[in-house]
């Protein structure tokens, strides 16, 4: 009997090993927040792709080239964020599976003892022999369920056998899903690396175009002419906004009372001043309706005075642009932003983060374009900021 029992136990171990090598998917945990974030990023990606497509159908110009590269960069950045979000989601799912598998294995070991007793009992009664078991190793489940000798004892042990088979499947599914998640994670990491390389390539294209504009008089003058045309279109936009003033709280301190003491939208160095400006190399004169500020470290753009956000969109020549209505026909404008933190219609307070500084449509690299306006008239921002 001892030899027979050892043979049966050996076979059971072999059967268990065979079943553990099979695979199937596991049910993932509730990750609605990740799904919501993925949907938001996917929507942003589709919007950028639409803008790229629209830009390709328009007449080519230097500003449109800057816009297209800017959109490509933004697209790649969003795709990288999408991959990172998927990666976090996959890692979380894998973590859940890796915590779940040991408990399933423990449960399976306990249920194995009950099934093992059934097999040993059958062997002792002479209702099944070692060689018959060996012929059934390729279908352990079928053997446990269909073997006619099993009915002598298993009719009273059906629940234990069913539990064992269910747990065995559950373990295989979890192991399989864990392997799939590992492959998914590996693919996402590789995709992110490729997107990063593409982003570096687009950055080089952008730098090359900016250098060409700033070093070639003909390209520079053509760009300035285009910028003047965009400035006129911005003026038209301000006229439309002025016709539909926002509802500003009556107890709000008027912006004109804060002249000379308003906080800076971002700390840094003023690299382009308000008014007429002579180019040091080409000796051409241009007019600036605002100032450009090179960030001194912190990239968060902040609101200078309470108000209502009336515009958040890409505006050629100014990049990602925010316009805030401060009441009584006073406005502030923030251009070249990398991304927005606020949306159109939001009420904002002084010092509240509204955007991240960027280089969209900027000829000066990473910088913030900033304007202050009364009605449609541009004012010197340096006379308003403390």
Image (tube, rainbow, N blue to C red):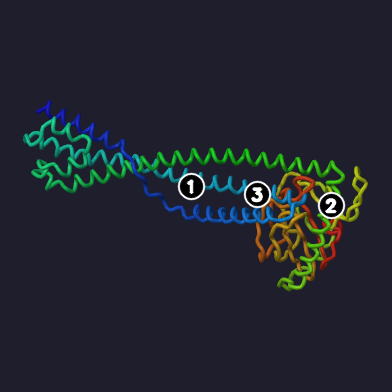
Which numbered disc, 2 or 3, marks the residue that appears first in the sequence? 3
Mark 3 vs mark 1, foreground winner is 3
Mark 2 vs mark 3, foreground winner is 2
Nearer to us in this view, 120 or 315: 315
Q: Position of residue 98 (x, y in %)?
A: 39, 40
Residue at disc 2, secondary structure: helix
Which residue corresponds to mark 1? 89
Q: Position of residue 194 (x, y in %)?
A: 58, 39
Which residue is at 86% across, 46% downward? 218
Which numbered disc, 2 or 1, marks the residue that appears first in the sequence? 1
Which numbered disc, 3 or 1, marks the residue that appears first in the sequence? 3
Which residue corresponds to mark 2? 224
Nearer to us in this view, 334 or 53: 53
Which residue is at 81% across, 61% downward? 372
Quadrant in which the N terminus appears: top left
Nearer to us in this view, 253 or 54: 54
> Label 3: few (<14), some or many (≥20) within 10 Å?
many
Q: Which mark is residue 74?
A: 3
> Label 1: few (<14), some or many (≥20) within 10 Å?
some
Q: Position of residue 269 (x, y in %)?
A: 81, 46
Mark 2 vs mark 1, foreground winner is 2
Quadrant of res 264: bottom right
């Amino acid at each position: 009997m001892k030899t027979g029992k050892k043979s049966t136990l050996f076979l059971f171990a072999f059967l268990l090993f065979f079943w553990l090598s099979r695979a199937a998917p596991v049910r993932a945990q509730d990750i609605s927040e990740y799904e919501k974030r993925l949907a938001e990023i996917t929507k942003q990606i589709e919007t950028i792709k639409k803008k790229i497509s629209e830009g390709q159908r328009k007449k080519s110009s230097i500003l449109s080239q800057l816009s297209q590269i800017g959109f490509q960069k933004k697209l790649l950045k969003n795709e990288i964020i999408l991959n990172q979000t998927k990666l976090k989601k996959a890692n979380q799912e894998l973590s859940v599976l890796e915590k779940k598998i040991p408990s399933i294995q423990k449960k399976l070991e306990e249920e194995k003892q009950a099934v093992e007793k059934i097999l040993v009992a059958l062997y002792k009664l002479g209702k099944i022999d070692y060689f018959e078991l060996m012929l059934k190793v390729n279908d352990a489940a079928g053997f446990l369920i269909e073997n006619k000798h099993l009915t002598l004892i298993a009719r009273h042990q059906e629940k234990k056998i069913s539990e064992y088979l269910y747990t065995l499947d559950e373990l295989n599914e979890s192991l399989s899903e864990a392997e799939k998640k590992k492959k998914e994670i590996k693919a996402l990491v590789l995709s992110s690396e490729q997107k990063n390389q593409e982003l570096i390539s687009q950055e080089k294209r952008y730098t090359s175009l900016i250098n060409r504009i700033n070093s070639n008089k003909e390209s520079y003058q053509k760009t300035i002419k285009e910028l003047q045309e965009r400035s006129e279109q911005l003026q038209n936009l301000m006229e439309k906004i002025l016709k539909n003033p926002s509802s500003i709280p009556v107890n709000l301190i008027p912006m004109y009372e804060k002249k000379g003491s308003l906080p800076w939208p971002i700390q840094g160095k003023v690299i382009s001043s308000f008014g007429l400006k002579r180019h040091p190399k080409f000796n051409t004169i241009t007019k600036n309706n605002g100032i450009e500020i090179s960030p001194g470290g912190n990239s968060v753009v902040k609101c200078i005075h309470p108000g209502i956000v009336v515009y958040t969109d890409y505006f050629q020549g100014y990049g990602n642009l925010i316009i805030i209505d401060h009441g009584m026909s006073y406005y502030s404008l923030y251009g070249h932003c990398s991304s927005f933190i606020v949306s159109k219609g939001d009420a904002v307070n002084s010092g509240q983060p509204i955007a991240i500084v960027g280089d969209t449509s900027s000829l000066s690299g990473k910088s913030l374009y900033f304007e202050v306006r009364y009605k449609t008239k541009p004012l010197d921002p340096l006379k308003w900021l403390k």
